Image (cartoon, rainbow, N blue to C red):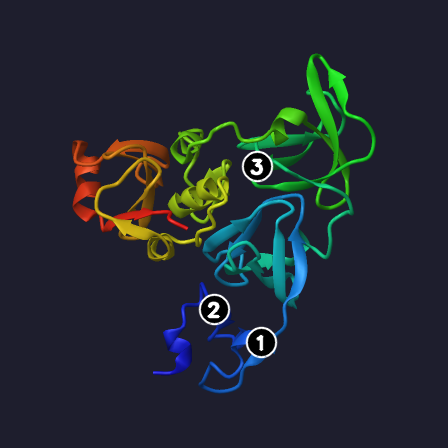
Amino acid sequence: MTVAQTLDPRLHVYDPVRRLAEKSLEGQLEGGEWQWLTAAAGWTGNARLSLRAAPELGAEQVSEALPGEPLSVLLRQGEWAWVKTEHDGYPGWVRVGGVLDGLSAGETLKITALRAHAYARPKISAPIVAELAFGAVAVQGSGESVTEGGRVWRPVLLPGGAAAWVQAVCAAPVSETDVADFALRFLDTPYVWGGRSAWGLDCSGLSQLVYAAFGRAIPRDADLQQKALSAVETPARGDLAFFPGHVGIMLDGRRVLHANATHMRVTIETLGEGEYGRRLQETCTGFGRWTA
């Protein structure tokens, strides 16, 4: 067995098919010639950026980068770039047109609304110029805020540099003090494989996003999240529940909130109740708690 076969490509950035690897892995990979890549800084543009398993439009989406999020750009190859998301090191192939070399200078503004729109003018009837979401980043624009119809608008620069306006409420501090309370805001969000926003997300995208809101950095995928948390026998509110290839957020000792492809949305199940709840209880592989 080669060393390459023992490394998880979600944690160690290399592609054994294309013989591409991050330079930090030099000397750790065997099996022929490798192209060693040095990462350059990049950022996601004005739209959510799909990370795919291969540089093909038909390839599986493995994750998603949100507007303004930092990236490490390992390779640009025609219309595609091989990147990893800076916050969790997760690699994937993206369309090169969605990657920026820099953001505008200024104070960054983090979006805290689950879903938000940026407008061409400070008016709700103005054209929408971008879709934003919790975790997306803009830059505070020049000029004063504008009050219109009782609404407070803030000038911003979108990641690509275009001037726009967002309502101040879209960047207000998260009011919830409890992980589970915040997670409940995502109820009925559509299920999207590889998604990481309230426009559509998957099970581990939900748990990662919710935990990040409280400064808890966990990996992208469910099995990695289970390894990262401390195992507990009796779950409490805010703990994660794990199943084969799946994860949910416990609301109490039995109820679990999760993004699932059975209902194609975020739902609540009670472990042991109903057909789905019984199946979840039977396949549960354990519970994890944040203890850092």
Q: CA distance from mark 2 to mark 1?
A: 11 Å
* Residue on which disc 1 sits: 23
Viewer-side residue, 219 vs 126: 219
Position of residue 183 relative to residue 122, above or below, is: below
Q: Earlier in the sequence, mark 3 or mark 1?
A: 1
Q: CA distance from mark 3 to mark 1?
A: 33 Å
Residue 37: image x %, image y %? Answer: 61, 74
SS state under label 2? loop
Please report the residue visible at 48 percent of the width from the left and 40 percent of the height from the top. 214
Question: Residue reaching furthest bottom?
Answer: 32
Local crowd at mark 2 within 10 Å, few (<14), some, or many (≥20)?
A: some
Identity of the amino acid at label 1?
Lys
- CB-based contact (under 8 Å), mark 3 and mark 2: no
Question: Residue reaching furthest top?
Answer: 149
Q: Earlier in the sequence, mark 3 or mark 2?
A: 2
Disc ID at residue 133: 3
Please report the residue visible at 45 percent of the width from the left and 65 percent of the height from the top. 11
Residue 264: image x %, image y %? Answer: 36, 37
**Residue 165 vs residue 26: left or right?**
right
* Residue on which disc 2 sits: 12
